[in-house]
Image: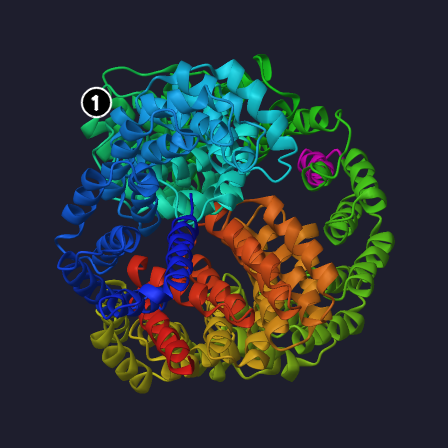
Amino acid sequence: MKKTLFFSTVSCLLNMGIESFAQNTMAYTDPESYYHKGVELFQKKVYAPAREEFRHYIQATQKTLNANEFNLTNAEYYAALSGLYTKNPDADIEIERFVINHSDHPKAKIIFGDLGNYFYAEGDYKRAIHYFEKASAENPASEQNIELKYKLAVSYYLINDFAKALPVFNEVKTVDSEFSAHAYYYAGVINYKNENYEAALADLKQVENMAPYKTEVPNWIANILYVSKKYDQLLAYTEPILEKPNGRKIDDMCLVTAEVCYFRDDFTKAARYYERYKTFRKGSVSNQVAFRHAYSLYKTENYAKAIENFKKIATQNNELGQQAAYYLGISSLKVNDLNSALAAFERAKSSNFDKIIQEEALFNYAKVAIDMGNSQQGLTELQNYLKIYPTGKYEDEASELMSEVMFEANNYIQAIAYIEGLKKRTPKLNEAYQRLAYGQGVLDFNAERFTKAIEFFEKSLKQPVNNELRQNATFWKAEAAYAAKLPETAGLYRDVLNGNFSSELKQKSKYALGYLHYNNKEYKQAGSYFKDYLKAPKTEANRQNYEDAIVRIGDCNLADKNYDEAIKYYDLAIRDNRTEKDYALYQKALTLTFVGRNQEALQLFDRVSAQYPNSRLVDDAWFQNASLELDKGNYQNAVNLLSRMVRERPKSNLIPQALMKRALAYGNLKNYEAALNDYKVIVMRYGKTDVAENALLGLQETLNTLGRSEEFSAVVEEYKKGNPGSGSVEGLEYETAKNLYLNEKYASAVSALQKFIAGYPGSTNAFEAKYYLADAYYMQNDKTNALKFYNQVISDNRTSYVTKSALRVASIESAAKNYKNAITGYRAVILSSSNKRDIVTAWQGLAEAYNLSGKQDSTIYFAREIINNGGNIVMGASNKAQLYIGKAYMGKNDLTRAEEEFRKTIALAKDVNGAEALYLIGEMQYRSKKYKESIKTIQELAQDFSDFLVWYEKGFFLITDNYIAMNDYFMAKATLKSIIENSETTETVALAKKRLKEIENKE
């Protein structure tokens, strides 16, 4: 009952009093003025003065004989009420006194109910209870009794006296009234609080669809079913409502439904209902709910949202926080965010609330570190794992992974020793051991440590788990024996030929056996193996060896004087080969000279120089042609050819022989002065060559012919000075200076060599001394003086060190970015050397120099020369060449073609060239503003090429550039901080700090 109901009753009584007063105006006396004034003030709700007026009235009336009983009773009533309204301490006593003194008065019957309503409306439930209890006792049969009992029960409820409230609600709900629905609701709530769930459910069901409870009650029912563990009933009840809420509150319903689905592993529904719960829920949710929501998202592979939710609790220092950090790491792995995964596993492994999670996190941390390319950190963590969990869940896998990491890091020796020290080895570890030993064998082979290589190939063969590795180890053991010139070499190759090996390795063994016998001058056996090799079809993969075998068969037949067979194979090479056509043409011509077909030979020698002007055999062809002309007596033709050779190929190794031939031709033409000049040049400049003594004889004979024999002794003296014997002072001085160089005493060697050159400028030893002087300067990093003397060696062309000097000059000039001079140096190498390794090295240098000087077509030309004609003479040369083709197209700004060529480089091998190629792809993507693609590419670089530190660290700086371009300064700074924390390169850390400061200054 509202407060207004009580006031209306009081107003009615007041009106009745006023009317009575009006009807008794004749009886109006002085005391009545108090009453009149009190009523007036009461109506104006000025209760304190009104109470005083009524009390004056009561006192004055009690002294009269003719009292107005009606007004007197009303005055007592109003005085009591006024005292109540003004919270007078005596108000309750006055009320009680009124009820006792006027028990038959109408108001005495309902005053307790009215007072209860008043205090109920005021929120003073304890006082309301006091009066409601009295009202119920005074008026048990009153029509208002149900209302009063309801309010009494509510008052009990609101002061949390549920024990007294419940029976009253139970009484009220059984009576059909406007309060029964409310009573059911409150009774249901109290029963729920008392854990009397069956009764609560029965009560709440009564008002489930009734206003105002139909919005709230479904949540209560859902909670009751949940705590009663009636999960099937719960889902049957809640899911239809959740599908169509129709204005009902469903926050708690979403939660309990999600919880049931979660624990039934129905994570799809659980995730959906948790999400709805969080949407409806005001404020934060509990950590447990947040975790289960995140886990449900994780189980349904919604990793992005799972990460978002796990992050909110992963920082907590408790068991739930540790578990959240672990699953945050797993979820981050699923989206390939290795950085976040590593950080999450770091947190999870650092907590010890859940030991199982801690073990899992530690192992996963190690794996992620390895995947990110931080092999050393990964190894350290794996070692920690095996130390902490020697019999752990991942014991075998950790050992296997350690061996794999060591293999990938080329740390084969450590890995082999580690596996050999294990007490037990799984089949996978045995296979890893086989692979590691094989890998170390290959490393030793490439480093020309052939005995060591054989040792590790044999170790690999002791664990023949992988058949392909077994075959390769056997073959490369034979190759190592071949390189070491061991007597068992042939037998090892024959083991491959006769055993269970691939056709490819059998072919390679035939080819190797061919060369083994060829080098031993066993030409018949060599030719037989080369012919067997040719029985297999020619492919692009074996093309170079196939074409070489054809030429070698020709050489074998030439050596065995089977000239027709030799010509047959040389013709085959000339017709079909892509490489060494110039050699085959030259060899055929040479063979023709042995069968007297000199005219044909002359034509073929001419073809060599005409068709292959850049061939290393041009000077040989000219020399052979000149020799033929000389043999035919065509002395002038011989002179012309040899003069051209001396003029155009001044650095040829055949110059002394050419001068000797020309001197003979001049002699036959009776041009004795010219002959004398050539003999003297040989004697004075090439005194240490094989033809020097013959030149002295020719000189002596010619001088005798001219009658000038007396001049010979002077030339001989000069010859002796230039070519002193080992016991001479000059010879001793030279050997002393030379030995200082050979003993790596470079500063002393410089001084001694300079003194020797100054003291004996005409000595032939002086030309060689210049090379040693240049190299001594080079070893002391004095590049300026080194260049000066290397160039003199090249210019003099009087020693066998011309090629080495040219290589040094080219290398120094290239490093100084003097690419024009570097190109000149590399071209000098090609002209001065007949060694294929030197020529391929020069092609490499030319490709690089032309690329860096912006001449990309020339870059592509020399790169393709390496790929097509270089073979495997220089380790990794083809890979490097392929890289330069990509760089050339990048230089041409043909980025699509450049990426194609870079991808080819990456496919060839996981070497430094592949690392640079992948970095350059990332750089091109950055230039094209494909920032996200660039970051992804560099992450591949970090994962697949982490051993190549230069490109690994450059890659992280490129990632920083990409983030800056995307205005993501947070990630840019995080990347630079990662470099600073993890790099061991001083220059890299300094650059990262500088870049970080630049970003911070911009913000």
Q: Residue at x 31, y 20 (%)?
A: 393
| Residue nearer the viewer, 504 or 747 | 504
Looking at the image, can residue 139 be seen? yes
Q: Quadrant of the N terminus?
A: top left
Q: Which SS type dominates the magenta stretch?
A: helix
| Residue 669 percent coordinates (x, y) | 74, 76
Q: Quadrant of residue 196?
A: top left
Q: In the image, what residue type sits under mark 1?
A: Pro
| Residue 563 percent coordinates (x, y) | 77, 37
| Residue 181 percent coordinates (x, y) | 50, 28
**Residue under label 1:** 390
Apparent side of residue 862 relative to residue 94 in the rendered image (left or right): right
Apparent side of residue 538 relative to residue 884 in the rendered image (left or right): right
Apparent side of residue 992 relative to residue 626 in the rendered image (left or right): left
Up-down: is 61 above or below 203?
below
Secondary element at image label 1: loop
Q: What colour scheme has been applied to the protein in the rendered image?
A: rainbow
Q: Residue at x 82, y 53 (%)?
A: 601
| Residue nearer the viewer, 703 or 555 | 555
Specify the segment rendered in magenta. 548-562
Q: Quadrant of residue 358?
A: top left
| Residue 376 percent coordinates (x, y) | 31, 45
Up-down: is 926 above or below 713?
above
Q: Quadrant of residue 786?
A: bottom left
